[in-house]
Every structure is written in structure tokens, then in C-alpha cells.
Amino acid sequence: MKLPSFNVVKSAFCTCLPKYNVNPYLGRCAHRCIYCYAVKFPSFRGPTLPRLRLKEDIIKMAENTELRLPVMFSDATDPYQPLERKYEITRRCLEILADRDFPLLIVTKSDLVTRDIDIFKRTRTVVSMTITTPRREIAEIIEPYAPPPQSRFSALQKIANEGIPTVVRIDPVIPTVNTNEDDLEAIISKSAEIGVKQITASTLKPVTGFFSTLKKRYPKLFSKLSEAYRDGEWISGYKYLRKEMRLEILKKIREKTMKYGLAFATCREGFPWLNTNVCDGSAYCRNTLEKFMK
């Protein structure tokens, strides 16, 4: 039993370096983002459930894992969703890994992440916060149960003030929803102001069932998005915008990011030449591979 490796899907343009991945919770993430891709996997549907044995399993996995690669929390459910306040499974797992010198990659939308700053300071850690819009009214539609954008910025400020590298993920970028250039620049300028090191951007890649669900809940938005994706293509189970359209969107975000002196990366887009750093931010917690060996 070893730490599970992150699944690199090269056919979907994934450029992540080797790393591990842990999901402390099963079922549908409680943030209920309308763009969630994890619903394509059976383990991440239905009610949110804590993986109560996970912290015990992590001890065995860590003891049997020789290579000290970064461990990501997490790729399918937010590690700091509301149940974490009660169960603290994420915290217990992080403590075990930090005690064993594993670097940590945190991906979240929750300001609860600041609770664990003490653990982050014990090992190499990067915190990535998803902020798709500076507007609360838009966030309440596309991320209805996640903390508001301002709370996320405040959390990043606290973390950056402690010297912990931070990344903002504008992910996903949804045509006609959060592509307003002034809003995008507001995210980037605020990120630079509070000490964020990098912007990672990725366009919306709907999974099967997304458009039918959207049509029932938001028919006007469905009309706009179905038209935008009409001439897109399915790649590895995801619907991509037409290549020229997504390149145009990402180049504009890159230009604004460069203007504020931040690193930039795309995620699963097929445009590696746009990147100035690794998309997951792990460059801030990786040394040579030999340093991760025990």
C-alpha cells in the first residue's frame, strides 16, 4: 500500500510532473460548483462522506512510499469543505505527511485552509486557491456553496504573509460568464498585491451531462454556452472549446499576468509555450528528485 499517484492524462494535454494525490472525502463535493468535472466518476457522486479510515491508511501508505514527491489535496473534492471542520481528516493526513517530509500541494476554494498554516510551515507547501470571479453574485451562481471570493483572497493574504507560496487558479474560465477582461484583471492585480506567486488558468471543459443539467437550471446560460461549444471537440471525456477560441482567451490572461510580474501557466490546454512555470505550482516545493529519497 503506497500513496496513490496522480493520474496524468497526456491525451488531455496534462503536463503535471509526477506527484501523489489524496481525496479525504467521497461523494459530491459540498461546494456544488455547476462546472464540477468529478461527477463523471462514480466515487464522487451522491452525498458527501468522510473517508474515516484514511488517516490510518495514510500512515501505512507514507511508510511504504520511498520517493518524497509532492502530495496533492485534492483533485476531486475540496479538502476543506464544511465536513472538515468536524472530522479534521485533511488536517490529520497533512500532519502525518509533514512529519515524514512530504511536500504538500493544497487545492481549495475554502478559507478554512488558514487553520492549517502551522502544518504548512513544517514542510514545503504550496497553496492554490481557485478564484474564478471577483463578483460575489457570479460566484453564488457557479459556486453556490463555496466561500465568497473576498474570503478566499483574505485567506491567501494570511498564508502569503507566513511565507508560504500561493497560486491563484482562474479555473475554469467560462465563456460569457467570467471572461470580462476588467474582472480578470481585478483577480490578477489583487493576487499580485497580496503576494501570490502565480496565476494558473484553464477553460471550462464540460463532462457528459453538464449541458442537460444546465438547460434545466439555467436555460439562458445553456443557450450561450451550447453555442460557444458548438464547434468544440471531445477529448478524453471532456468537451473543449475550439482551439482558436481558448487560445485567444488564455493569451489575454497571460498578458495581464505578465503585466503584474507573476508566473503563468495553463492547465490541460495544449499550449505549453504559454507557460512560465508548472501549472500546479509544485515548482515552489520541489527540489531535485534525490532530495525526496529517504
Image (cartoon, grey):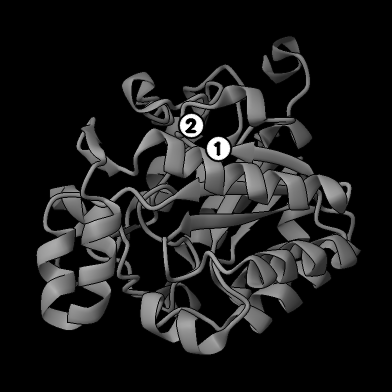
The amino acid type, in three-letter code, at marker 2 is Tyr
Mark 2 residue crowding within 10 angstroms, few (<14) / some (14–19) / many (20+):
many
Mark 1 residue crowding within 10 angstroms, few (<14) / some (14–19) / many (20+):
many
- Using the image as rendered, state which of residue 10 and residue 28 is in the foreground: 10
Marks 2 and 1 in Cβ contact (< 8 Å): yes
Q: CA distance from mark 2 to mark 1?
A: 5 Å
Above or below for 283 versus 24? above
- The residue that appears at 34% across and 39% down in the rendered structure is 242
Label 2 residue SS: strand
Q: Which quadrant does the C terminus fall into?
A: top right
Left or right: 12, with 78 as reference point: left
- Using the image as rendered, state which of residue 272 and residue 102 is in the foreground: 272
- Using the image as rendered, state which of residue 39 and residue 214 is in the foreground: 214
The amino acid type, in three-letter code, at marker 1 is Val
Q: Which residue is mark 2?
A: 20
Q: Which residue is mark 1?
A: 71
- The residue that appears at 43% across and 86% down in the rendered structure is 140
